[in-house]
Each structure stands twice: as structure tokens, then as C-alpha cells.
Amino acid sequence: PEAMVMVEGKPKPSQPHWFELYVQPCAAELLGTAYFVFVGCLSVVEDTPGVGRLQPALVHGLVLGLLIATMAGI
């Protein structure tokens, strides 16, 4: 029979660097907000007749989903 190898537990991770604690979340918030406002404003500039409020609402919803998916790890 094959011998079972016992794997020891992972070592306790050290404290995160100050960059990961303070700078990275602030930069992600700044970029996310800027992108959200930029794309939202662009969706209103190209006002297609007959669309009304649907176009800006749809764009904001899609951008919000995209930003959450890309920056959720931060």
C-alpha cells in the first residue's frame, strides 16, 4: 500500500504591507469612481431618441457589474 504523506498546515501569513492596506484600496476607489462617472456621462451625451432613461440606467448597471468583478479582490 502507498504511504500517506501528512501535509503540515500552512504558516500563518504575516501582516499585509502598508501599500496593500492603504494605497491599493484608495487607488481602486479612485479609479472605479472615475470610470463610473466617465462612462455614465458618455452614456448621456449620445442621447438616442426614444430610449429615454433606459440607456443611462443600463450603462450604469453594466459598469457597476464590471467594476465589482474586476476590483473585488482589492
Image (cartoon, rainbow, N blue to C red):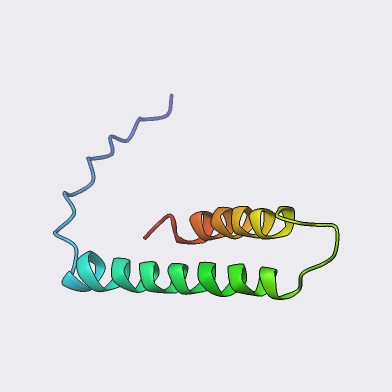
Q: x and y percent of residue 1 in the render?
A: 43, 24
Q: x and y percent of residue 42 in the render?
A: 65, 74
Quadrant in the rendering for residue 50: bottom right
Q: How many marks?
A: 0
Quadrant in the rendering for residue 43: bottom right
Q: Identify which residue, 38 or 7, lies in the foreground.
A: 38
- Say left or right for 10 vs 69: left
- Say left or right for 41 vs 35: right
- Say left or right for 60 vs 46: left
What residue is shown at x 14% (from left), y 59% (from top)?
A: 15
- Say left or right for 9 vs 55: left
What residue is shown at x 22% (from left), y 73% (from top)?
A: 19
- Above or below 20: residue 58: above
Quadrant in the rendering for residue 66: bottom right
Q: Identify which residue, 30 or 10, lies in the foreground.
A: 30
Q: x and y percent of residue 64 in the render?
A: 55, 56
- Above or below 71: residue 45: below
Q: Identify which residue, 34 or 19, lies in the foreground.
A: 34
What residue is shown at x 37% (from left), y 67% (from top)?
A: 29
What residue is shown at x 52% (from left), y 60% (from top)?
A: 67
* Quarter containing the C terminus: bottom left
Q: x and y percent of residue 14 in the render?
A: 14, 58
